[in-house]
Amino acid sequence: MRKELAEGVHLNISTIKKFKTISIRIQFKSKIESDQITSKALLANMLSTNSQHYPTQTDFRGALSSLYGAQFSVDVEKAGNVHLLTLEMDIVDDQFLVEKNIFEKAMLFLKNVLFYPNASDCTFHGETFEREVVNLKDEYASLYEDKQEYAGVEASKLYFDTLEQKIPAWGRSEDLEKITPKSLYKVYEQMLSSDQITITILGDIDENRVTEVLKSFDFKDRSLIGNQIFYKDKIFNGVKRKTEYQEIAQSKLNLVFDASIYYHEDLYYAGQVFNGLFGGFSHSKLFTVVREEHGLAYDIVSGIDSYNGILYVQSGIDHTQYETVEKMILKQLKRIQEGDFSKEIIEQSKSLLKSALFQSEDYADSIIERQISFELIDQPLLSLEEWKDKINAVTKSEIIEIAKTIKLKAVFLLSGGLR
Amino acid sequence: MDKFVYKELKETVYRKELKNGLTVILLPKKEYRTTYALFSTDYGSIDQLFIQEGEKNSSQFPPGVAHFLEHKLFETENGDVFDDFSRFGASANAFTGITKTAYLFSCTENVRENLDILLNFVQTPYFTEESVDREKEIIGQEIQMYEDQPEWIGMMGLLNNLYPNHPIQTDIAGTVDSIKNITADDLYKNHHAFYHPSNMQLVVAGNIDVYRTIKWIEANQAAKSFEAINKIQRIFPTDSEQIIVPFKSFKMDVVKSKVYMGIKGSRHTLRGQEALVYSLKMEFILKMLFGETSRTYLDLYNQQIIDDSFNYEHTIERQVDYLSISGDTTDPVEFTEIFKQLLLTAVHNPDFNEAHFELVKKRIIGQELQSLNSLDYIANQFADLTGTKETVFDIIYLIEQIELQEIVQLASQYLLEQRLSVFHILPDLDAEKSK
């Protein structure tokens, strides 16, 4: 069921009986602004630490524990030109418990946390603010220790042209220093009053229970941000390259390509099949040629960011082999562009894509993610059967066509070799 | 076929031991689209020295042999198994642990074909020296990847301290040097010893018809011949909870120091329900002392002694029983002192009270119920619970039975200084300078 609670505030209820949980999501959506990214990340941490009703973490986490270990988090993400902040809560369906009304209690918790943050006089609580700033700083610093993630972030920075796309969803250190408890509160207020909102409830739950409890959530009308989610204004001035040296045993080679693969646009399904046979699956060209035939990598995989129209390849290699590996990756792309791939590999990729699609139906998170994705592109939800048909219909020439739109734009090497 | 009905949880489990000794567990979930299968053997990285029945002498194999074998089974005489699975729409994977190796797939169609592929590739070893040598390069890359992960170095460092004379302190994948010596013959010998059906278990969960599925599995197994059930005698060094290295540190290119603390237990011979209840009790101890509802957590978080990286867990497996606490910290010495005190005075901790116990119990029950959405969680729990009638669906009942007094008692027996060990990872300031 889909319902409009106020202008720009939507409620989706999916009654699904097979899970032992009820999933609740409240998502705030705005156009991405470079100077808000870090604030939103910090705000997410503040909202998941404490609140007026639960002033310490012990109170806060105690309330969640007493709701039978309810999982609560606040996440930020970027999707193309859109910025999302989501309150997520998963609770046990109380038909499996002696205690009842867990859903109502969980919604009360969410209301308290969202509408009564730990703030007074339009200023966030000082000590909590200080602690969470330090925490976020530590997180930025610790990115250095996760080499895979680090290389991915550096490759994105190299690839993107605009600041709002270069900055990762969790923000960056130099912006953190400019935020104050007061400025952060303004960001919070603006989010609450102006951001578009989607509320999703999924599980074996009666719709009346949901609408009844949401009556006390006071969301005002807000304007719609329009449908310009895809990042398409791209500049190409040749391949950008960067190498960084660190004391590491395994080097990381990341390639980022322009690709006209956008969520549910015409060639999207061909793009999915292309990615599957190029580097997405273990029968793919990259996995079988680079890893299995030549033993040049343990890890090699390609993926699509279909809000930004990007294809990326990441690999873990020996630093002496980076030129060989890059050439080998590009050669596999060229082979596909020239139609040098079998009917068999197309069929394998299609069958795994369909399998993954239907398997996703067994995860509450994936169902919600699919619903939200269609909300984001402002199109009606495609049924799994329709989606399957679209994958089946992909032809070899469409795969070649989409492969030809793919153009290398950035190469980042994190090298364990000597400078 | 035995049938176990869990009415309150709306679940039913079927179990059968086949003639060749293979244990099959079936868990139908008709509303699910996915079928998930997990084929596992009671054999892991620590099983490096053993005597086969009928032989006089023991054979010693290099560290990493179980993991190497897992990799190599995916290559058959007819090519790569991933290709076969892809053709039938299954995504496949495998993992090697310290006492288990498991092979799995998930799919939404062609369950019979995929079950056949799974059973056949795991039960039909095919190795050549040439392909074994090529695999050494791939696994070498994998090992190097781990070497760059501080949390992995930390856990291995702690295990080295807690088990200085035991093969658990060798890396699961081995080292670049140790795997150099692995031969095709080593792989055949280990396969022969540990991949007999009587040492294995197959769990199939999800969208299945129980009676057809067991028929398919039986038909597959009946078409193969196996030797009579053979007994393997695994050999391990004599160990006790007192044999530990109390402290070591290691420098690497990290931004913040990391502390790994562990306490070694002595109950690694527990099996089945006893082991399960024991590990649940340890979970209570850790959550009550250091969990996010404890006063300790809040104080230490606010004082910036711990941060979001703080973690704790207890592990019990064949040969292994230890708890670990880890976290990033600006002052590793202070972190260590504080947690040492907390562990050694645990029974007097104000958080060990009835109200907190009930709160933690609610949390543990709720999290267990939430996990039951996941087919892979359920199947993996069965793989961990071999040799017992209890299933994953008994866990909630077992949690409900636990009492505070038992927790306190266990804490007083377990949390002892002579069993405690510490491993520090410290920033390498020389590496810092050269940047």
Image (cartoon, coloured by chain):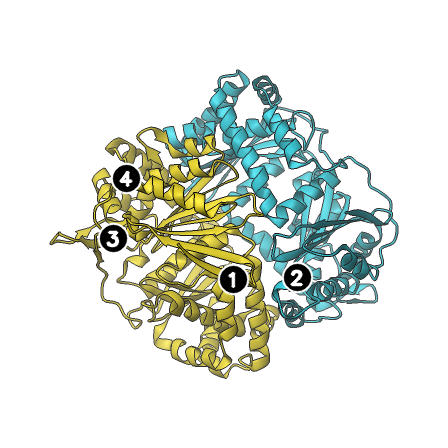
Chain colours: A cyan, B yellow
Q: What residue sits right under mark 3 in the picture?
A: B48
| Percent coordinates x, y for residue B186 in the rendering | 22, 43
Residue type at mark 3 is Gln
Q: Quadrant of residue A96?
A: bottom right
- Residue A119 falls left or right of residue B26: right
Mark 2, chain letter? A
Label at residue B6:
1
Residue type at mark 2 is Glu
Q: Nearer the N terminus, badge 1 or badge 4?
A: 1
Tell me how far mark 1 sits from mark 2, CA to CA: 44 Å
Q: Secondary structure at mark 1?
A: strand
Tags 3 and 4 touching, CB below 8 Å: no
Tags 3 and 2 touching, CB below 8 Å: no
Q: Nearer the N terminus, badge 3 or badge 4?
A: 3
Q: Are marks 1 and 4 on the same chain?
A: yes
Few, some or many C-alpha atoms within 10 Å of disc 3 (few <14, some 14-19, many ≥20)? many
Q: Quadrant of residue A122?
A: bottom right
Between residue A285 and residue B103, name the one nearer to us: B103
Q: What residue sits right under mark 2 in the picture?
A: A132
Q: What residue sits right under mark 4 in the picture?
A: B224
Q: Are marks 3 and 1 on the same chain?
A: yes
Tags 3 and 1 touching, CB below 8 Å: no
| Percent coordinates x, y for residue A39 in the rendering | 72, 53
| Percent coordinates x, y for residue A131 in the rendering | 65, 64
Residue closest to the far bottom = B348
Between residue B111 and residue A280, name the one nearer to us: B111
Between residue B167 and residue A354, name the one nearer to us: A354
